[in-house]
Amino acid sequence: MNKNVKISIAVALLLVGGALYFSFSKNNAGTDTTLAAKLATELTQIPTQAGKNDFLKQSQNLTKDVNPELLDLDSQIITCGANLDALASGSQTYEGSCVAAGGTLPNTTGKYLGGQCCSALMDTVERHANLQKLQAYKSMPNIPLDPMHTPIAMAKQWIDYDNATKLTPAQQAIYNQAYAISKEKPCCCKCWHYFVDEGIAKKMIIDGIFNAQQIAAFWDASDICGG
């Protein structure tokens, strides 16, 4: 093979390689633009600032697609407010969380009290394991078996029950034992979820259905704080 032929082949290979690279770069840029537009639209549809902040972290500032299950969790009412009277009466104002300040919702239709009030959940592995553990308590009426989708009315019912219910010294001893055993306690901070889980524990103790170990396990599986 003479020198001119070798040069011609080399030039041809460079041209083909350059064309392929340009084509890949162009297609990849188009994909990135489409993804960014999709993520930006999803961000605008999230009702709370805490949910938006969680989504931004999960999407690495709108550069990575987000698991639809996580997007759904971001789209619930994320608040640490312990008083649900306003939300339960139809108000669209909600209190803040550890992730962001409160604000006003467009509406509460189809929305639940959610989790991730301390930090964003980055995957669903532990969440799914906890949902499975909570099935052990399904015989107890009207408790949230998916605490990151807690109906407002259900939460208020348990908070009201908690406020109205005082345990006897013997019952309080069981509660204290569960509290000492549990890693999560009723919740990491005294938000709506804390008082819901406290009310549920009181009911479990009064009904004599679950012991301290089982109550502690319920609290731990009910963790909603986030990642």
Image: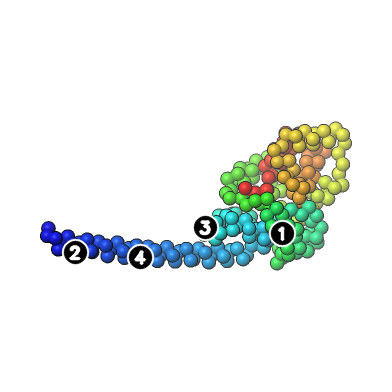
Inter-mark Cα distance, 4 to 1: 45 Å
Colour pattern of the rendering: rainbow
The amino acid at mark 4 is: Phe
The amino acid at mark 1 is: Ala
Q: Which residue, given by chain and number where applicable, does mark 1 sit on?
A: 101
* Mark 2 and mark 3 residues within 8 Å of each other at the beta carbon: no
Judge by depth and name the residue closer to the eye, 76 or 131.
76
Q: Position of residue 133 (x, y in %)?
A: 65, 41
Inter-mark Cα distance, 1 to 2: 66 Å
> Which residue does the image show at 72% across and 45% down from the upper left?
188
Does dot 1 land on a helix, a strand or a loop? loop
Which label sits on residue 8? 2
Q: Position of residue 49 (x, y in %)?
A: 67, 61
Does dot 3 land on a helix, a strand or a loop? loop
The amino acid at mark 3 is: Lys
> Which residue does the image show at 83% across and 46% down from the upper left?
162
Inter-mark Cα distance, 3 to 4: 23 Å
Does dot 4 land on a helix, a strand or a loop? helix
> Which residue does the image show at 62% across and 52% down from the upper left?
120
Which label sits on residue 22? 4
